[in-house]
Amino acid sequence: MGAEVGMATQPSPFPENEEALLALARAVRETGYSFTTVTPASHARVNARPRNAEARSLRDVFGWSRPVRPDRLPEGLARLMEEAGAAVSDGGLLRPTIRLSSLDGELFTHSAYPPSAADAVFFGPDTTRFVAAVLAHLDGLERPPRRIADIGCGSGAAGIALAKRSPGAETVLVDINPAALRAARVNARLAGVDGIETRRSDLLQDVEGSFDLIVSNPPFMIDASERAYRHGGGPLGAGLSLSVVEAATERLAPGGSLVLFTGAAIVEGEDGFRDAAGATCARAGLDWSYREYDPDAYGEELDDPAYGEAERIALVVLTATRS
């Protein structure tokens, strides 16, 4: 991941003042702001262009994470950024510490680029793919879920999208990262969604009861820095994804289902994650299906010696249902 041009590179913590952050996000939304967040690789390439060293618009600030001269911001916005802890001083400029991304008609707060802090709250193209996968599954259900869990919720995008379409349901956003839970709470309030609870938990260990729908997009990479949003652990990064499958086998209600969006490293044409996850589902008596959403993603990761045996990394969707 390349360094930003003209920007400090030290990671900044996600803001702790949720009320001030919510006020800032609402103020930005009122300007008509929207932004589609790209991959970190694309972000680095676009920001490396000399003309992009400094922000000229709100999209540059809250989308591209570029430093801005305070007098270029709409009136009052610099003050809101400072009150929220969403900016740091950088040579007379303000450098944003959050991003705001558009999805499903809402804005979502998450960590600024580069997301290099150990507790960074990640949001990117996989978030969009994940939300699309869970909503497609929701559309196919015969009855609406009464209790939903989003494991490793990050920004909360999937759980919030499901809650919007499941009036009366209880939705629990679960993450081990306190910064992610702060972001998810702000995002739920920003979307005006009721019935959402956030819970700090390792998988479902500190969450009670069974669920009609469990969704998850866990970290699935091998990350030497072991950043919470990225490192999956286990064989070729599949450790957390397999743990989610195991947790779901114990907590799905009758008729309940799991939708897992993750990545699988393919070695010599074999998908070890599919084999292991399918075996877990079969032992639990779950009906399951599996498909490759994208057969070749994150090709740049194959340069890492940790992937020395892998020929590709596929994005996959596992669906499992308790009959």
Image: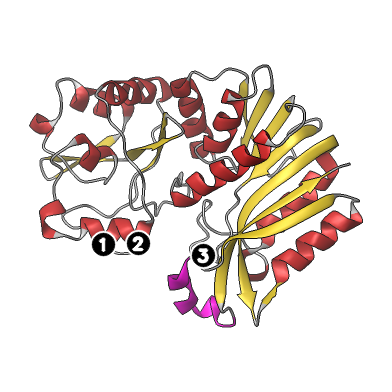
Indicate which disc, 3 or 2, sits on the residue closer to the N terminus: 2
Check residue 85 for magenta coloring: no
Crowding at dot 2, Cα within 10 Å, few <14 / some 14-19 / many 20+, comes out as: few
Residue matched to label 2: 41
Callout 2, which amino acid? Ala
Calculate the distance from the C-alpha at mark 3 to the C-alpha at mark 1: 21 Å
Marking on residue 132:
none
The location of residue 44, given as percent across then percent down, is 28, 59
Drawn side of residue 287 relative to residue 59, left or right: right
Drawn side of residue 73 relative to residue 296, left or right: left
Q: In the rendered structure, are the residues bearing label 2 and label 1 in contact, judged by CB atoms less than 8 Å apart?
A: yes
Calculate the distance from the C-alpha at mark 2 to the C-alpha at mark 1: 6 Å
Q: Vertical placement of 113 versus 105: above or below?
A: below
Q: What stretch is highlighted in magenta?
A: 298-309
Label 3 secondary element: loop
The location of residue 246, given as percent across then percent down, is 79, 52
Residue at x 66% of width, y 30% of height:
172
Residue matched to label 3: 223
Marking on residue 45:
1
In the rendered view, how is the structure colored? secondary structure
